[in-house]
Image: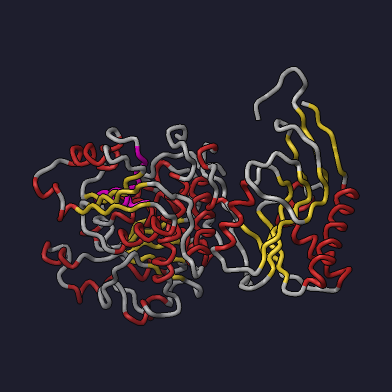
Amino acid sequence: MRRKTILDATGISRSLGRLALELTERLQGCRDVVLIGIHRRGVPLAGRIAETLKRVEKVDVPVGSLDINLYRDDFSTFGTAPVLRGTQVDFDIEGRIVVLVDDVLFTGRTVRAALDALVDLGRPSKVQLAVLVDRGHRELPIQADYVGLSLNTRREDMVELRLSEIDGEDALVLESPDAGKKQKG
Amino acid sequence: MEFRHKDLLGIESLSAEDIATILDTADKMSEVSRRPLKKVPALRGKLVVNLFFENSTRTRSSFEIAEKRLSADALNFSASTSSVQKGESLVDTVLNLERMQPDCYVMRHASAGSCSLIRKYTKASIVNAGDGAHEHPTQALLDAMTIRQKKGGFKGLEVLIAGDISHSRVVGSNIRLLNTMGANVTVCGPATMMPPHIESLGVKATTDLEKALCGKDVVMMLRIQLERQRTGLFPSLLEYYKEFGLTEERLKLAKKDVIVMHPGPINRGVEMSSEVADGPYSVILDQVENGVSVRMAVLYLLLGGGDNEAAH
């Protein structure tokens, strides 16, 4: 297994800053916008984007968190039921623009489940997707509206975003199985 | 944090970590019940058979709501309207139901150990919803969820369980759970309703309610089955109330922030006065609400892992 650090703390902060900037540009002042992070690492990311928006654009954007484990379609691949983190959306999403936030966009199945979970909470006027990393290999027709970094990966690679709120450090790490000993993804 | 069980037959088989996982999951399930759209697809396509050989309105309704909130298909099978009336045995009933490919049985039966018995005849998960006076694990778990919500934890908590200790299916599960989580349990009731050697379960026992109430954080009153009056265990309901009924006056002996619990249905003026049941210390209705969350959590943890054959 080869481990390579793609982004350090500064790189992550720069990517997120760019992403927040693009968001305000496209959503024109972020009126009626809410951010909802997908557990686990989408939640601190949503918080950081909201902080940037407050600092740079002087707008307060409500932040919520979404647990998609009760909406998954891949239960059979787990040995035990996934740990629930809880959904916390203390504001009405009816008629608002919801920006879903996640760390790494891969197969698209997490986002599909998140869309199901979201419509159970209300009917937003628009739903968009912001991810820090898009690593490709989609299994569903889902694309992100805002991408911090597009990364070329092989299907069997592991992309891990580490965040100080959860992991004690900020780093984007790519792990590749050694050549010759190819593993199935 | 991983929950590796196929069945929930009793509290006995759960570790402190397992119990914490169930309670954490139940806390998260409460959010689902408070939404305008109270349903998630977690157990879509799973068949849960509610196999009730004894009458139970609230436990069964609570399970049924939990199953529906998780999108499982619920089949209600009650002994009074079924083939059991025609003389079918428990094992035969299960063998027949088995061919309808259920994923889980929620079972209530008058005989202790009946859930363990059917385990041999089914591939499905089993949740014990009360087997005789043996165990009623989801009741103990919903009590624990309520205690944790109000008290923040269990370590060193002084808990009194009072009433008909002998005939309660709640008491055994509760003692096991509270001991596992580090609370100190006292039981109190008339000598005729106290099983011999109850201390061997790791509790203090007394027949003096006022003494028992002193310094308690939690007071759990058990139901007196009115039918038992005729069996001579106590002279009259009024006399029972006089000796063992919880009144506001007596409650003052407990800690200032005491909570009062009852598994329901309550007999006002027997186990406790109306002032206590409806008073500020009472968390009886919170227990009912938490019952749905705990049962959702148990079903999700047992069935949500996909391959429950692998989870043992």
Q: Is residue A104 left or right of residue B47?
A: right
Image location (x, y in percent) of residue A90: 62, 70
Q: Is residue A139 left or right of residue A56?
A: left
Q: Which residues are magenta?
A: B124-137
Screen quadrant of the C terminus of chain B: top left
Residue occupying the far top of the picture: A180
Image location (x, y in percent) of residue B136: 33, 52
In the image shown, does B212 or A100 lie closer to the viewer?
A100
Residue located at (77% from left, 35% from top): A153
Residue B103 to residue B248: above or below: above
Q: Is residue B249 magenta?
A: no
Image location (x, y in percent) of residue B208: 32, 66
Image location (x, y in percent) of residue A73: 53, 45
Residue B53 to residue B222: above or below: above
Residue located at (41% from left, 80% from top): B279
* Residue B196 seen from this side: no
